[in-house]
């Protein structure tokens, strides 16, 4: 179904249609046969066994609950759909505990060009750090630090004050805004300050560098630097979000065992930066989000630069793939729908780009899209007629805020949402 709400409802990341199991998926041997079938390496056999499990009362429900941990996300989601119809207490408890990886704030519209700072980061409320108040909720809040114009205090200095707080070692999420008086100063000073603070910030799990509005700096003016030292200094880090592509690097290639989400928001993402991302060894990565931006601002990345992500299963545990803010969204469709990656994703996010009815038609013709839980095609160039065609899909479709073509912008009047 299509939906005009920006924020998915609870559990929407595991919703789908009521597609039946394979017609030839007969399971024999009673409850023991069902259990044996669930160890079969063929996904279709395991899905058929889940439907059979419904015949065996509480014992069958226990099997379905266990299937929520199956290594295949298709099996997990099928089990979820069957359990969602049940009212037994053990089922409700299991569904409450089960939730696929989902940074819910990523479905909101981009905050920066709307003139406000992010209200949420890493599923936490963002709170401006005030030394007079201190750190009162180190786990459930993300504390933001920004350059102070009245005192001209830069962020390394402000971070030093934060580290003096009694609860500093309990902090799990930090947001960094403008780090110096001008955005023409690159982020290396805050990167180094974070590296120096690693012995104090021992529980840090989420970092966002670059929460700037257009009043602070246009996104194309933000000067980033080599971010890899942060990954080396914080082995427990789970979420890393960077805004601004100028000067951004991830080098040398490193391994990080716990990073679950990498978000790179740019006005122009270079192919060199993409190549560096692909060289990283991130076995736990579940959420990869890249904003490609405009070629006028250094965005020289193209479809073939993403082959390692789309075809080589570089990040095999991805749940969410965001190829956003692109000038080549139509050209992305064929590689995605013809790649095995579409069978393992829960969420495909193509928002803020240049998708037309031509590219959307190719999506419609791919049955693999039904394997998704959410398809985000908001802020593109789709007609209402085309959006209506998606209503028959099992996946939930987000298609808000379609753009009108601009004769003064990009080829054929199409443009990505964020370029300056």
Image: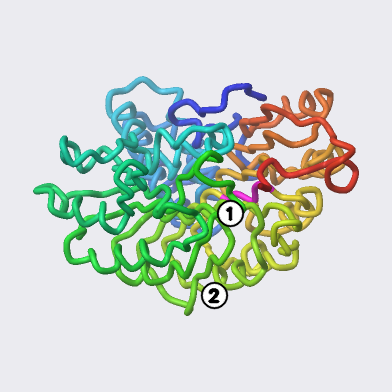
Of residues 381 and 147, the one nearer the viewer is 147
Quarter of the rendering containing residue 237: bottom left
| Residue at 63% in and 22% down | 4
Secondary structure of the residue carrying numbered label 2:
helix
Quarter of the rendering containing residue 377: top right
Dominant secondary structure of the residues highlighted in magenta in the image:
strand
Real-space Cα distance between discs 2 and 1?
Answer: 26 Å
| Residue at 62% in and 45% down | 348
| Residue at 30% in and 63% down | 194
Q: Position of residue 136 (x, y in %)?
A: 16, 36
Of residues 329 and 46, the one nearer the viewer is 329
Q: Is residue 331 above or below residue 391?
A: below
Q: Residue furthest bottom?
A: 252
Quadrant of the frame with the N terminus: top right
The residue identified by callout 2 is 279
Q: Circle 1: is it few (<14), some (14-19), or many (20+) Cα within 10 Å?
A: many
Q: Verify CB contact (< 8 Å) between mark 2 and mark 1.
A: no
Q: Is residue 255 inside the magenta stretch?
A: no
Q: Is residue 407 above or below residue 185?
A: above
The residue identified by callout 1 is 221
| Magenta extent | 321-325
Q: Position of residue 61 (x, y in %)?
A: 36, 33
| Residue at 40% in and 36% down | 120
Q: Position of residue 171 (x, y in %)?
A: 22, 49
Of residues 1 and 194, the one nearer the viewer is 194
């Amino acid at each position: 179904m299509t939906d005009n709400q920006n924020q998915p409802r609870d559990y929407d990341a595991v919703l789908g249609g009521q597609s039946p199991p394979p017609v030839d998926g007969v399971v024999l041997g009673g409850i023991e046969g069902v259990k044996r079938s669930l160890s079969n390496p063929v996904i279709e056999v395991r899905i058929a066994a889940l439907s059979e499990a419904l015949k065996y009362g509480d014992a069958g429900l226990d099997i379905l609950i266990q299937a929520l941990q199956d290594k295949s996300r298709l099996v997990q989601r099928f089990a979820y759909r069957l359990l969602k119809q049940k009212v037994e207490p053990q089922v409700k408890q299991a569904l409450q505990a089960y939730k696929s990886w989902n940074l819910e704030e990523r479905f909101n519209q981009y905050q920066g060009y709307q003139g406000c700072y992010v209200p949420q980061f890493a599923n936490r409320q963002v709170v401006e750090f005030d030394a007079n108040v201190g750190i009162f909720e180190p786990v459930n809040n993300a504390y933001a630090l920004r350059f102070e114009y009245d005192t001209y205090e830069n962020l390394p200095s402000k971070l030093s004050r934060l580290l003096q707080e009694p609860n500093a070692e309990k902090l799990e999420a930090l947001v960094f805004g403008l780090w110096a008086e001008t955005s023409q100063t690159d982020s290396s000073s805050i990167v180094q300050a974070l590296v120096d603070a690693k012995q104090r910030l021992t529980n840090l799990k989420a970092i966002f560098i670059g929460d700037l509005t257009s009043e602070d700096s246009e996104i194309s003016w933000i000067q980033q630097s080599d971010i890899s030292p942060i990954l080396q200094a914080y082995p427990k880090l789970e979420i890393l979000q960077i805004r601004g592509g100028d000067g951004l690097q991830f080098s040398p290639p490193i391994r990080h065992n716990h990073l679950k989400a990498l978000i790179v928001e740019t006005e122009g993402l270079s192919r060199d930066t993409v190549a560096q991302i692909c060289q990283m060894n991130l076995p736990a990565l579940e959420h990869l989000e890249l904003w490609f931006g405009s070629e006028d601002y250094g965005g020289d990345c193209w479809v073939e630069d993403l082959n390692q992500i789309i075809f080589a299963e570089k990040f095999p545990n991805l749940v969410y793939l965001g190829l956003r803010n692109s000038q080549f969204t139509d050209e992305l469709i064929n590689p995605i729908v013809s790649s095995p990656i579409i069978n393992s994703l829960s969420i495909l996010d193509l928002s803020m780009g240049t998708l037309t009815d031509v590219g959307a038609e190719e999506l419609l013709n791919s049955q693999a899209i039904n394997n998704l839980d959410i398809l985000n095609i908001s802020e593109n160039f789709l007609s209402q007629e085309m959006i209506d065609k998606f209503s028959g899909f099992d996946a939930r479709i987000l298609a808000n805020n379609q753009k009108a073509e601009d004769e003064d912008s990009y080829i054929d009047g199409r443009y990505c949402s964020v370029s300056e």
